[in-house]
Image (cartoon, rainbow, N blue to C red):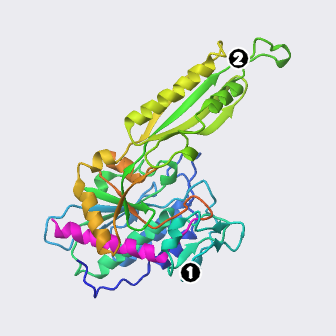
Amino acid sequence: MLAPTFAFKHTVTERFLRYVVIDTQSDPDSPTCPSTEKQKNLGRLLVSELQEMGIVDAHLDEHDYVYATIPANSDKKVPVICFCSHMDTSPDCTGKDVKPQIVRNYRGGDIVLPADPTQIIRPVDHPVLNDQIGNDIITTDGTTLLGADNKAGLAEIMDAAHFLVQNPQVKHGTIKILFTPDEEIGRGVDRVDLKKLGAEFAYTMDGETAGNIEDETFSADGATITIEGVSTHPGFAKGKMEHAIKIASAIVDRLPKATCSPETTEGKEGFLHPISISGALEKATIGFIVRDFTDDGLKEKEALLEGIVKDVMKDYPRSTYRMEVKPQYRNMKQVIDRHPEIVDYAMEAIRRAGLRPVKASIRGGTDGSRLSFMGLPCPNIFAGEHAFHSRLEWVSRQDMEKAVQTIVHLAMIWEERA
C-alpha cells in the first residue's frame, strides 16, 4: 500500500488547464486519421512532456497515436498493463478558444458561467455537485465545452506517470501509455498497433463519478434505411408520386414515443435513435444508432425497426426500401468477465485512494469496448468528468487527484499480486 509519507504534488490541475485550451475537436465527416490535424498539436505536447519526464520511447505515430512505456522496476513477472485516454473532444459542441474557470471552495448552489449567464450548472440537474462541497470546480466560461472528456483522463495518466518515474521506490511492472484520436466519432482504435503496444490488460480513464469503475457498456449497431420512392412531375402526380421524404418521415413518426428512445430510457434499457435524415423526392435515407446491453436486445430493436418500415411501405406499393445494419461495438463485459482480477484490482485501488468503489454500466461505449474485443480487456475507471459534450461540462480538482492516486495504487497492486 502507498506509504502515507508519499505526497502527491497536485499538479494534475495545471496539466489539465494546459491541455483544454488546445482545440482537438474531431470531425465525423472527415475520411482522414486523425480526422482533424489539430489533434496532433496536443499529441506533440504530450510526447514532449513524457520525454521530459525521462520516458525515452514516447512518440507520436503518423495517425496521431501516442505510445509510451514506463519500464518495470520489479523483479517479479508482472503482467503489462496500459492506461488509455483519448485526445479529441466531441463534435457536438465547439472546443475552440476554451476559457476554463475555477470555482474555488465550492459552497453549493448554482454555478453561473460568466460569458453566458444563461448557462447555469444547477445541483438540481447535477446532483453529484452536492458531493463537491469544499472542492474546486473547473468549468468553462459558458461559450464552449470544457474538454474534461477526456483531457481529465490525459492529465491524470500524465501525472501518475510523472509520480511513478519520480518515485522508483514504488514498485510496479511495465506500464504502457496509449493516447488515441477520434474516440468521439467512434474511430478511436481504428489504427492502434496492439503488437507495438504490447499490453496484456488495459484501463481507460474516461469515466464520470469519482469511485466508479465500469465493466459493462452498450452493444452498438448502426442501421441505415434507404427509401426509393416514385418520382413524377408534381403537376401530374395524382395517383403516381410516392414521395421518399414523406415515407422516411412516416417511418420516424411511427417509432415508439413512450419507450425505446434515449429520452425515455435509463439503466439497462436500450433504444432506437434516428441520428440523420436526408434525401429528395426519389430517394431518402435515415440513419439510426441501435443500443442495448445484450446482442439479443439489439436484434429485437432492429426487428422492431424493420417491422415499422414494412408497415409504412404497405401504403407505398411501388416504392422499395433497403435496410443495412453494421456492427459498431459490443458490450465489453463479455470479455472482462473472463478476467475478474482486472476489475477486482481496480476496486482495491479505488479503496486505497480513499473512495468507495462502485461498479457501474456505461450507457455508451469507450475505446475499451473495442479494445476488449481486439484482445486487450479494458474496463473504464472514473476521470471525474461531468456533463460532457456540453457547455455545462465540469470536473473537480479533488476528483482528478483521486484518479491519479487510483492509477498509482493500481500499478502497485498488479506488482503486489504477481
Query: Is residue 305 located in the magenta-colored stretch of the structure?
Result: no
Up/down of 411 relative to 136, above or below: above
Q: Dots 2 and 1: beta carbons under 8 Å?
A: no
Could you tell me how far apart the alpha carbons at marks 2 and 1 are, in whole angstroms?
63 Å
Name which residue lies at 55% across and 41% down: 261
Name which residue lies at 18% across and 64% down: 78
Image quarter hosting the N terminus: bottom left
**Element marked by disc 1:** loop
Residue matched to label 1? 107
Residue at the extreme bottom = 5
Q: Is residue 187 left or right of residue 321?
A: left
One can see residue 255 in this view: yes
Q: Earlier in the sequence, mark 2 or mark 1?
A: 1
Q: Nearer the viewer, residue 418 or 165?
A: 418
Q: Position of residue 332 (x, y in %)?
A: 34, 48
Name which residue lies at 56% across and 80% down: 107
Residue matched to label 2? 230
Q: Position of residue 178 (x, y in %)?
A: 37, 61
**Element marked by disc 2:** loop
How many tags in the picture?
2
Residue density around tag 2, few if under 14, some if 14–19, many if 20 or more, within 10 Å: some
Residue 388 bears which disc, if any? none
By secondary structure, the bulk of the magenta-drawn segment is best described as: helix
Name which residue lies at 67% across and 72% down: 112
Residue density around tag 1, few if under 14, some if 14–19, many if 20 or more, within 10 Å: some
One can see residue 51 in this view: no
Q: Nearer the viewer, mark 2 or mark 1?
A: 1
Q: Quadrant of residue 392?
A: bottom right
Q: Nearer the viewer, residue 238 or 169?
A: 238
Which region of the structure is painted magenta? 393-418
Q: Quadrant of residue 68?
A: bottom left
